[in-house]
Image (cartoon, rainbow, N blue to C red):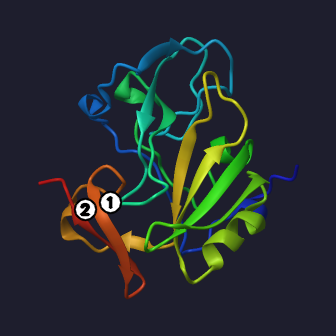
Amino acid sequence: MADTATATQLPATLRVRALPSPLELSKYSSPSTKTLTVDEENSFPCRRCLKDGAVGDEMLLTPYDPFLGDSPYRQPGPIFVHLNPTCGAYKPDGRLPEQLRRRLLSVRSFGKDHCMVDADVVQGDQLPLIMRFIAVVAVLFAGLAAAQPVEDGDSLVARACKHEACANACCVSHGGCNSLNCGTSYCSGGKCHCDCHYG
């Protein structure tokens, strides 16, 4: 599979969002949450730093609901995050993260009503195929998940939003919005707006 800068360069209107750092683990208190030790490279994709856990790292496998609003498709899915928050926040470099590029991805796009518009399975390094989901005017965001088993289940690894930086002043002061601190999000004037839950 080709993996060149041009093949994986993101357009200016596409953002890949990760969970915030530090992550409030209290939000993930669940009887079903497990603590696992990485025993194989490239098998435990952290949803916060968007890097795979290294052998020996401790990871949480926990349910997570990526939807910002009510949807008939709304349901929690399993994600990995480093137990130790020192993995740090994801730092965008204008490309799809390597964690996504090397995986077979399940891509589902959703509209403003949070109903599914399209879905398919694509190789992570095939950005043009992924972009066709975002190019549809009716699409608000697309969810990217590992399409092959990752340890105990598939793992939602990222959220792709076709908005520019969030215009909410509170989100800007906290380093940008994400699906944990934002409520209903919408697009206006080419920018992402949201109901901020920081305060």
Which amino acid type corresponds to the residue marked 2 in the rendered image? Cys
Report how far apart the C-alphas of labels 1 and 2 lie in the structure.
Answer: 5 Å
- Residue 95 visible to an observer of this rendering: no
Q: Residues within 10 Å of mark 2 (few under 14, many from 20)?
A: many
Q: Is residue 114 left or right of residue 193?
A: right
Please, what secondary structure does the residue beneath circle 1 have? loop
Image quadrant where residue 168 sits: bottom left
The quadrant in which the C terminus is found is bottom left
Q: Where is residue 27 in the image (x, y as percent from the top left)?
A: 27, 34
Image quadrant where residue 42 sits: top right
| Residue farthest bottom in this picture | 189
Q: Position of residue 143 (x, y in %)?
A: 56, 55
Residue found 51% across the figure and 33% down from its top: 78
- Name above or below for residue 101 compared with residue 80: below
Residue found 32% across the figure and 31% down from its top: 28
| Residue farthest right in this picture | 1
What residue is disc 2 on?
171
Please, what secondary structure does the residue beneath circle 2 have? helix
1 and 2 marks in contact (CB < 8 Å) = yes
Give the number of the disc on residue 33.
Answer: none
Residue found 58% across the figure and 33% down from its top: 45
- Name above or below for residue 15 compared with residue 101: below
Q: Residues within 10 Å of mark 1 (few under 14, many from 20)?
A: some
Q: Is residue 38 left or right of residue 168?
A: right
User: Which of 133/169 is in front?
Assistant: 133
Among numbered discs 1 and 2, the one appearing first in the sequence: 2
What residue is disc 1 on?
176
User: Which of 193/57 is in front?
Assistant: 193
Q: Where is residue 134 in the image (x, y as percent from the top left)?
A: 61, 72
